[in-house]
Amino acid sequence: MPILYRMHQDNRKNSAHKGKWYARAVMNGTVGIDEVAEVMQRNCTLKKSDIRAVIAELVETMQDFLQNSMRVKLDGLGSFKIGLKTKAADKPENFNAGTNVVGMRVNFQPEVTIGKNGVRRQALLTGAKVQETSRNTVDSRKKKKPKAGGGTPSQP
């Protein structure tokens, strides 16, 4: 099945590309561990409960490694590592983790494959095709906010 997209117009006031049209990927929903485990169960010898247990343990194990400053590489998927958001300090000796570290995040870097032609491609996108969704309607009019009031008064 292809990756679906819908057309979107850039309407930002100060954009150099104001008025131009771009494709945005359309998500048809979200699948959770149960749905993933169900499909995997049909494709291998493991039971759904075993797959769920492995995924749960993977999450805990990754958390341990990441919080010990390790990069976690899952072959065929990519690498995970911790990134920091910090406020600058004038000198290294003025840097204090308690005040200068203002946030943390998990960074994901997809695994990349290199084709025979030398083109790099993210492993998860190998063979992917795109297609405009049939529900696409291009409407450049601004949506009006509904007016207050209206409707039918309730009967006692």
Image (spheres, helix red, strand yellow):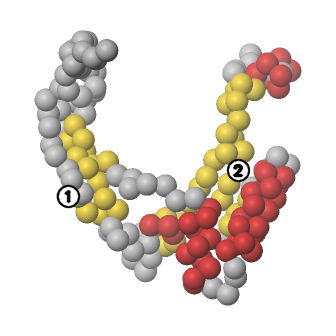
> Horizontally, is 12 left or right of 73 in the view?
left
Q: Which residue is mark 2?
A: 81
Quadrant where the N terminus is found in the figure: bottom left
Which disc number belongs to residue 134? 1
- At a point 69% along the width and 21% down the height, the residue shown is 87
- Tell me which corner region of the image, top left, top right, bottom left or bottom right, holds residue 50: bottom right
Quadrant where the C terminus is found in the figure: top left
Vertical position of residue 68 compared to residue 59: above or below: above
Towards the viewer: 150 or 75 = 150
Residue neighbourhood size for the residue with mark 2, other residues' Cα within 10 Å, grouped as few (<14), some (14–19), many (≥20): some
Q: Earlier in the sequence, mark 1 or mark 2?
A: 2
Towards the viewer: 49 or 149 = 149
- At a point 20% along the width and 42% down the height, the residue shown is 21
Towards the viewer: 115 or 126 = 126
Q: Percent x, y for residue 99?
A: 79, 19
- At a point 50% along the width and 67% down the height, the residue shown is 124
Q: Percent x, y for residue 9?
A: 22, 37
Residue 91 shows in the view: no
> Horizontally, is 144 left or right of 14 in the view?
left
Q: Secondary structure at mark 2?
A: strand
Residue 29 shows in the view: yes
Q: Percent x, y for residue 34?
A: 61, 64
